C-alpha cells in the first residue's frame, strides 16, 4: 500500500475538498452509491443516497473490513462473504458486474479496479445504482412493442372509404374509436376535417396521391376534441364496380410508437449520464493521485531526514503539489460555475488590453523558458461587449497552454484583426503541436493529447475546456489548427455588435 496509497482517512484539507466534490456529484445523480476499498479489503470511501436503504452506515464503514460491515438490506451475510474472493479478483485487474434485488428494487453492482498511472491496481471501486425504474421502463418498452405488433398482425387500423369530394362513405369501429366519433357522426365529417391542414407535409402528400394514385407516409390527424396525433397513412385510389373513383385510407395511430421511441431516447440518456459520471470519477482520481502520492512520500521522508536542505527540498515539493491541487480544484469549480451560468450583462472592453494583461500575467513562465513573445495587434479594433474578467481568463488559459507546450527558446505570437462582422484573435506557438487524430477532442474536459506529460506540465486538462465555454458564452467560437511537431494556432472569433444579453 505504501507505493500507491488510497485516500487516507486523515486526508489533508485539499483532499477533503476533493471528497466534497465527489459528494456534490453523487447528489446530482440520484439512486447511486460509490464505495472504494483498499488492497486489504477495507473501506476508504462510501458516498451516495443508496447506502442507507441498503443497510450501510457510511460513518461506520471507513477503515472496516468488508466482512465487518455487511449490507444487510441487500443480501444475507453468508452470501456477502462469498463475494470476498470476487473482490480480491478485482485487485488483480478483473471487473465484476451483477444484479441484486431487495424490497421490490433491482440494483446493478459494478466492481472495477482502480489503477495508478503505471497501470498497477491499488484499490477497488464499487458502483451501485438503482435500476428499478430502468428495468420497469424496458419492460414497458417490450410490452409496448408487443402491443404494436399485435395491432399490425390483426389489422386493427382505422379504415375509411371516401368519394372524390372527400365525403366519408364507410368507416370501421377502429376509425370511430381513433377519432372519437360515433359511426353516424363520422359519416357526416369530410375527409379534410380529419387531417391537420397545418401539417407542412400535406401538400406534397396530396400531390403524390393525385399524380400516382397512392401515398404512404406520416401525417398529423385531428380528433373530435381537436387534439392532434401522428399517424401512418396508406392512401390509395381505386375504381368500384360501377367504374367510379373512390379512395381507401388506412390509418395507423403512431402515438404509442412515438412515446416508445421517446422512452428509448431517455433510457439512452440515462446510460450516458452514468457513463459520464464513471469517466469523471476516473479522470479526477487520475489527476489527484500523483500529487497526493508525492505529498505523502515527501511528508514521510521529511521525518526521516536530519539534513535541513533536503528537508526544505521535500517541503517545497509538498507546497508545489498542494498548489497544483488548488489549481485543479479551482478549475473544477470554474467549470461548475460556467455550467450554471446562462447569461450576463455585457460591458464594453478592449480585447487588445486584455491580451496584453494576459501575457504580462504569464511573464514569469515565459521568462523562465526564454520564450519570444510577439504582438501583431490591430490598434483600430472596436470595443467588444462581454464580461472582461471571464474573457481575460479565457485568454490566460489559451496563452498558458501555448507556453506549457512550447519548448525553451520557442516563440509565441499574439495577434488581433477584424472582419466586417467580427474581431478575430490568433494565438500562435511553435510548440509540439497536436496530432490530427486528437484535434476533435482537445476541448473536452480532462482530455490531454499527450497524457504522459501531465505530471510534467501540471495541467489538469481543463484550461482549454474553460476557455471554450467562456468564448461560447460570448456567442463566439474557439477553433484550433495544428501540425504535430511544428506548433498550433488557436483562433477566437467574437461578434462586433453588442448583444442585448449573452446566453450560452
Image: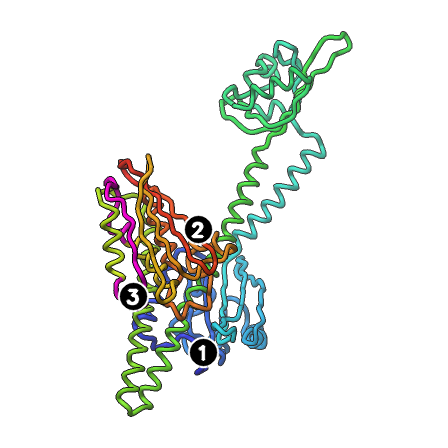
The residue under the point 26% across, 37% down is: 498
Q: Position of residue 61 (x, y in %)?
A: 42, 74
Q: Which mark is residue 481?
A: 2
Marked residue nearer the N-terminal end (3 or 2): 3
Q: Is residue 296 visible?
A: yes
Other-residue count near label 1 (Cα within 10 Å), few / some / many at <14 / 14–19 / ≥20: some
Q: Secondary structure at mark 1?
A: loop
Write down the residue under mark 3. Answer: 365
Give the CA separation, mark 1 to mark 3: 31 Å
Q: Position of residue 198 (x, y in %)?
A: 50, 21
Q: Secondary structure at mark 3?
A: helix
Q: Nearer the viewer, mark 2 or mark 1?
A: 2
Q: Is residue 334 left or right of 200 when viewed as pictured?
A: left
Q: Is residue 190 left or right of 479 when viewed as pictured?
A: right
Write down the residue under mark 1. Answer: 4
Here the colouring is rainbow
Q: Which residues are magenta?
A: 363-392
Q: Residue furthest bottom?
A: 306
Amino acid at each position: 500500500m505504501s507505493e500507491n496509497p488510497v485516500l487516507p482517512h486523515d486526508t489533508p484539507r485539499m483532499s477533503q475538498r476533493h471528497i466534497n466534490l465527489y459528494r456534490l456529484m453523487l447528489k446530482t445523480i440520484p439512486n447511486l452509491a460509490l464505495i472504494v476499498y483498499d488492497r486489504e479489503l477495507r473501506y476508504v470511501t462510501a458516498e451516495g443516497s443508496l447506502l442507507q436503504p441498503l443497510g450501510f452506515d457510511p460513518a461506520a464503514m471507513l477503515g472496516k473490513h468488508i466482512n465487518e460491515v455487511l449490507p444487510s438490506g441487500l443480501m444475507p451475510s453468508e452470501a456477502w462473504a462469498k463475494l470476498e474472493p470476487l473482490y480480491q479478483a478485482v485487485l488483480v485487474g478483473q471487473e465484476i458486474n451483477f444484479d441484486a434485488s431487495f424490497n421490490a428494487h433491482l440494483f446493478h453492482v459494478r466492481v472495477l479496479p482502480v489503477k495508478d498511472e503505471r497501470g498497477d491496481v491499488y484499490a477497488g471501486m464499487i458502483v451501485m445504482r438503482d435500476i428499478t425504474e430502468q428495468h420497469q421502463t424496458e419492460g414497458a418498452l417490450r410490452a409496448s412493442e408487443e402491443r404494436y405488433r399485435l395491432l399490425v398482425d390483426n389489422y386493427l387500423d382505422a379504415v375509411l372509404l371516401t368519394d372524390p369530394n372527400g365525403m366519408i362513405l364507410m368507416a370501421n369501429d377502429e376509425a370511430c374509436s381513433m377519432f372519437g366519433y360515433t359511426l353516424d357522426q363520422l359519416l357526416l365529417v369530410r375527409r379534410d376535417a380529419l387531417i391537420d391542414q397545418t401539417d407542412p407535409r400535406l401538400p406534397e402528400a396530396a400531390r403524390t396521391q393525385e399524380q400516382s394514385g397512392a401515398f404512404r407516409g406520416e401525417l398529423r390527424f385531428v380528433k373530435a376534441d381537436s387534439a392532434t396525433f401522428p399517424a401512418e397513412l396508406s392512401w390509395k385510389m381505386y375504381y368500384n364496380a360501377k367504374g367510379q373513383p373512390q379512395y381507401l385510407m388506412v390509418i395507423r395511430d403512431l402515438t404509442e410508437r412515438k412515446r416508445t421511441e421517446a422512452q428509448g431516447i431517455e433510457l439512452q440518456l440515462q446510460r450516458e449520464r452514468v457513463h459520464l459520471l464513471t469517466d469523471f470519477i476516473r479522470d479526477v482520481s487520475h489527476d489527484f493521485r500523483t500529487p497526493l502520492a508525492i505529498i505523502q512520500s515527501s511528508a514521510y521522508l521529511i521525518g526521516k531526514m536530519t539534513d535541513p536542505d533536503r528537508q526544505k527540498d521535500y517541503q517545497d515539493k509538498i507546497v508545489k503539489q498542494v498548489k497544483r491541487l488548488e489549481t485543479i480544484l479551482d478549475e473544477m469549480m470554474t467549470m461548475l460555475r460556467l455550467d450554471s451560468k446562462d447569461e450576463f450583462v455585457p460591458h464594453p472592453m478592449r480585447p487588445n488590453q486584455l491580451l496584453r494583461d494576459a501575457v504580462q500575467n504569464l511573464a514569469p513562465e515565459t521568462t523562465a523558458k526564454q520564450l519570444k513573445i510577439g504582438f501583431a495587434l490591430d490598434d483600430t479594433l472596436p470595443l467588444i461587449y462581454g464580461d472582461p474578467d471571464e474573457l481575460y481568463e479565457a485568454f490566460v488559459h489559451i496563452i498558458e497552454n501555448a507556453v506549457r507546450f512550447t519548448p525553451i527558446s520557442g516563440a509565441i505570437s499574439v495577434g488581433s484583426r477584424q472582419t466586417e462582422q467580427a474581431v478575430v484573435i490568433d494565438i500562435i506557438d511553435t510548440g509540439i503541436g497536436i496530432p490530427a487524430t486528437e484535434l476533435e477532442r482537445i476541448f473536452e474536459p480532462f482530455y490531454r493529447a499527450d497524457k504522459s506529460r501531465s505530471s510534467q506540465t501540471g495541467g489538469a486538462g481543463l484550461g482549454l475546456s474553460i476557455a471554450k465555454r467562456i468564448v461560447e458564452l460570448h456567442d463566439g467560437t474557439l477553433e484550433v489548427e495544428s501540425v504535430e511537431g511544428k506548433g498550433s494556432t488557436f483562433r477566437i472569433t467574437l461578434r462586433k455588435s453588442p448583444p442585448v444579453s449573452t446566453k450560452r
